[in-house]
Amino acid sequence: MLGNFAYCNPTKLYFGDDSLKYLNDELPKYGKNVVLVYGTGSIKKNGIYDEVMEILKANGCNIAEISGVMPNPTLEKLYEGIEIARNHHADFLLAVGGGSVCDYTKAVSVSVNCSDDPWEKYYIRFEEPDCEIIPVGCVLTMVGTGSEMNAGAVITNHETKMKIGHVFADENIMPKFSILNPKYTLTLPHYQMVAGIYDIFNHICEQYFSGEDDNTSDYISEGLMRSLIESSRIANKNPQNYEARSNIMWTATWALNTLVSRGKSTDWEVHMLGQAVGAHTDATHGMTLSAVSLPYYRYIMPYGLKKFVRFAKNVWNVDTSGKSDEQAANEGLCAMENWMKELGLVMNISELGASEDMIEKIADSTLVMESGYKVLDRDEIIRILKESL
């Protein structure tokens, strides 16, 4: 295992079907002015909103609300949330929802007391906050992003057609606590469930497909991927299977809480491609990733062939004996493709609203990462996007 690194994750997790009660233990640690942040209304339909509000009121909280946070939170919505939190003199932000709500809430937390424009400071210059950060807690209702245990926040700027994530270095931006009740995920539509599953899988891939050393993180990643594949097949047939859904929820958290990235250079180009597609189509994040993944991996495979062979053997049980490395690696990607189709994932960007005449604009919105097996140029990005159509 090569490289030098630091690891710190201060987020406290409460997991299980009675985990919401621990909100009572956490709220007294913060001030009384609480801003409740949630999405477009599902938590009111399934009763989670009422449960949370009851606990907030029982703890004497003064409550303001930021509602209507969309699946791809926009810069305009961020400005709106900043204003609400400032006017409420917020002491604490409580996100109740999926990864987009958690991401958005962290973006608000670093922006309320910031004198600079948050887009310019955090998403163009990628600076760290130099202001007071409002603490955040999460009640998770949808799995995929891992936002409940990391310092990432993704915001979409519709004007510039850019969707950018900032993974902050400051651990104070991580949620102070997150409540993970798998039962809250059981009412998700199938489309959202499988999109989240692929988001989890690709988070692991983005960290796995980098480096060639014998790295403990890769062994952990392979175990997480195998667990996710098994649980996803069960949940795909029976979405109400609590054991499968709880395993998926737990895997999502460990896929992106920075553990398996330790000692790794990581890649993240699939996310850059998918986020560019999402900025132009407003499509569901996990589906933008599934639509571009295979063309990207097939393109970079020759540059990281050893790892792709390992992926085929250790994740997909491909018998590599008597086969060339290229043949074994291709069989692994074919097995991955079959699994993706089995789940019902979107396999091309045209299904998401992208068209050939949009390809160059999407390419121009794609950030290029420099730590994967191949640093792409613009022509290569266009080629991969065309293969994704």
Image: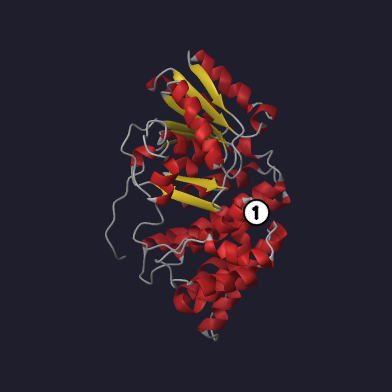
Is residue 219 left or right of 339 when viewed as pictured? left
| Looking at the image, residue 352 lies above or below residue 186 | below
x%, y% of residue 248? 57, 48
| Looking at the image, residue 176 lies above or below residue 5 | above
Task: Using the rendered view, name the quadrant where residue 330 is placed.
Answer: bottom right
x%, y% of residue 32? 43, 17
Q: Is residue 231 visible?
A: no
Give the number of marks.
1
x%, y% of residue 237? 72, 52
Along the line of sight, the residue nearer the viewer: 309 or 52: 52
| Quadrant of the snapshot with the N terminus | bottom left
Would you name the residue on which mark 1 appears? 281
| Quadrant of the snapshot with the C terminus | bottom right
Q: Is residue 280 visible?
A: yes
Q: Secondary structure at mark 1?
A: helix
Task: Using the rendered view, name the quadrant where residue 114 is placed.
Answer: top left
Q: Give the residue displayed 57% in from the left and 17% down from the top.
A: 54
Q: Which residue is at the far front?
A: 159
Along the line of sight, the residue nearer the viewer: 233 or 137: 137
Q: Give the residue displayed 54% in from the left and 82% down from the top.
A: 326
x%, y% of residue 105? 49, 35
The three-letter amino acid code for the residue at tag 1 is Thr
Q: Give the residue displayed 52% in from the left and 19% down from the top.
A: 63
Q: Which residue is at the far left?
A: 4
Is residue 24 left or right of 10 when viewed as pictured? right
Colour scheme used in the picture? Answer: secondary structure
Q: Give the residue displayed 43% in from the left and 23% down from the top.
A: 90
Circle 1 crowding by C-alpha within 10 Å: few under 14, some 14–19, many from 20: some
